[in-house]
Image (cartoon, rainbow, N blue to C red):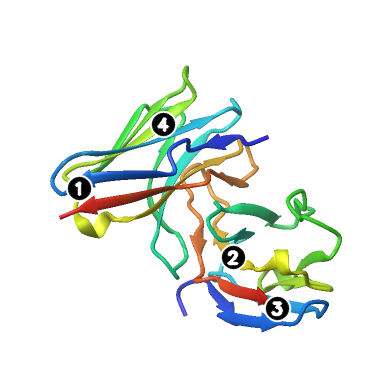
Amino acid sequence: DQQVKQNSPSLSVQEGRISILNCDYTNSMFDYFLWYKKYPAEGPTFLISISSIKDKNEDGRFTVFLNKSAKHLSLHIVPSQPGDSAVYFCAARSGGSNYKLTFGKGTLLTVNP
Amino acid sequence: GAGVSQSPSNKVTEKGKDVELRCDPISGHTALYWYRQSLGQGLEFLIYFQGNSAPDKSGLPSDRFSAERTGGSVSTLTIQRTQQEDSAVYLCASSLMRGLNTEAFFGQGTRLTVV
């Protein structure tokens, strides 16, 4: 049973526009959520995170929104740049003292010049 | 080095052979994770070491897979009698276990090809 779901395997956006990547989860015990970016032949790199006690976290062009009642989070990138083209993974951390991370299957973002 | 180091970066092995993959986590990180990514797939959880607690092995796909973490630092993932479906990129990550806001840092991965 997949606890973290990224239902869009791919997304294509024009340079300068907004990219919105979505993620749904089923486990209400998750207390911390992260987004990772992965380029081919490299390990995933941390991008931005949000605690379950917040509903928004912003870092430059990247903003993550959390809707706990809907068990949904999204990553907004604005303006999108060609260098943002990568696979984006949503991850969730189990609650309490358990630091295990559960990942979604990823969304391939392509930003067209 | 400052980051998570994995070796080898690439490994080609014959079906039926055993392989060992190594992970050197960031110094001081007490949590260590192994994931794998098969072609076109997401990150599949394998095993998780958290401090001195018993590891969470719930993601290991079969008893051919095992992992150790010696001295709370270096970890080795062993795959016995490799099969072609074991071909994947094996990723190791480590994190601090401190407070709420901790992220895992990944190594570059080991690309395993079973022929």
The quadrant of the picture occupied by the N terminus of chain A is top right
Could you tell me which chain the residue with mark 3 belongs to? B
Q: CA distance from mark 3 to mark 4?
A: 40 Å
Mark 4, Cα crowd under 10 Å, few <14 / some 14-19 / many 20+, is many
Q: Please indicate whether residue A19 sits to the left or right of residue B30 in the image.
A: left
Location of residue A66 by image quarter: top left
Could you tell me which chain the residue with mark 2 belongs to? B
Residue at 47% in and 47% down: A106
Provide the secondary structure element on which disc 3 rests. Answer: loop
In depth, the one of B104 and B82 nearer the eye is: B82
User: Which residue is tagged 4?
Assistant: A73
Q: Amino acid at mark 4?
A: Leu
In depth, the one of B5 and B44 nearer the eye is: B44
Q: CA distance from mark 1 to mark 2?
A: 29 Å
User: Which residue is tagged 3?
Assistant: B115
Q: Amino acid at mark 1?
A: Ser
Q: Nearer the viewer, mark 3 or mark 4?
A: 3
Mark 1, Cα crowd under 10 Å, few <14 / some 14-19 / many 20+, is many
| Image spot of residue A92 (x, y percent) | 53, 40
3 and 4 marks on the same chain: no
> Which sits earlier in the primary sequence, circle 4 or circle 1?
4
Residue at 62% in and 52% down: B44
User: Which residue is tagged 1?
Assistant: A80
| Image spot of residue B26 (x, y percent) | 53, 69
Q: Amino acid at mark 2?
A: Cys
Q: CA distance from mark 1 to mark 3?
A: 40 Å
User: Which residue is tagged 2?
Assistant: B92
Location of residue A113 by image quarter: bottom left
